[in-house]
Image (cartoon, rainbow, N blue to C red):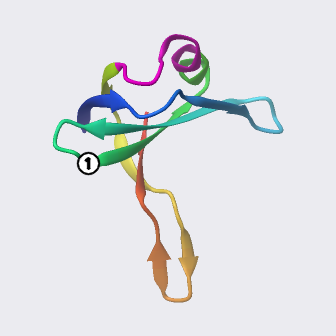
Amino acid sequence: MVVIGRLTEDPDLRYTTRGDARGRFTMETEHGGRVDVVLHGPLAVEASDCLRRGAEIHVRGYIMADGRLRGERLMWPPALQV
């Protein structure tokens, strides 16, 4: 899946307890929808260094349900994994 849009905020970079980089940001598409994007490894660090709020970007990845089960119902917004 390819998504084109603008960042709504600067990317958030965090590290796991094992030291792996994980970045996350939200982008708004040209049709007004919002998509959460998750990056891993060196790409997460590079995105954090180079991208800023309002930047137009093109992202290619896959949709992954990034949620938890609550009773019988899956609660989620999907996140685009890059």
In the rendered image of this protein, does residue 79 appear above or below residue 54? below
Q: Quadrant of the N terminus?
A: top left
Horizontally, residue 77 falls left or right of residue 49, namely left
- Amino acid at the residue labelled 1: Gly
Residue 8 point in image, percent of width and height: 41, 34
Q: Is residue 75 left or right of residue 4?
A: right
What residue span does the magenta drawing correspond to? 46-55
The C terminus: image quadrant: top left
15 vs 72, left or right, is right
The residue lying furthest to the bottom in this view is 72
Residue 57 locus on image (x, y percent) = 32, 22
Q: Nearer the viewer, residue 39 or 4?
A: 4
Residue at image mark 1: 33
Task: Where is residue 66? Give x, y as percent.
Answer: 50, 57
Tag 1: Cα neighbours inside 10 Å, few (<14), some, or many (≥20)? few
Residue 74 to residue 25: above or below: below
Seen at 57% across and 24% down, the residue is 44
For this view, does 66 lie left or right of residue 63?
A: right
Q: Residue furthest left?
A: 31
Name the spot of residue 38 as percent of width and height, x first: 50, 38
Residue under the image location 76 percent in, 38 percent down: 16
Observer-nearest of 62 and 26? 26
- Circle 1: element type: loop
Q: Quadrant of residue 71?
A: bottom right
Residue at 55% x, 14% y is 46
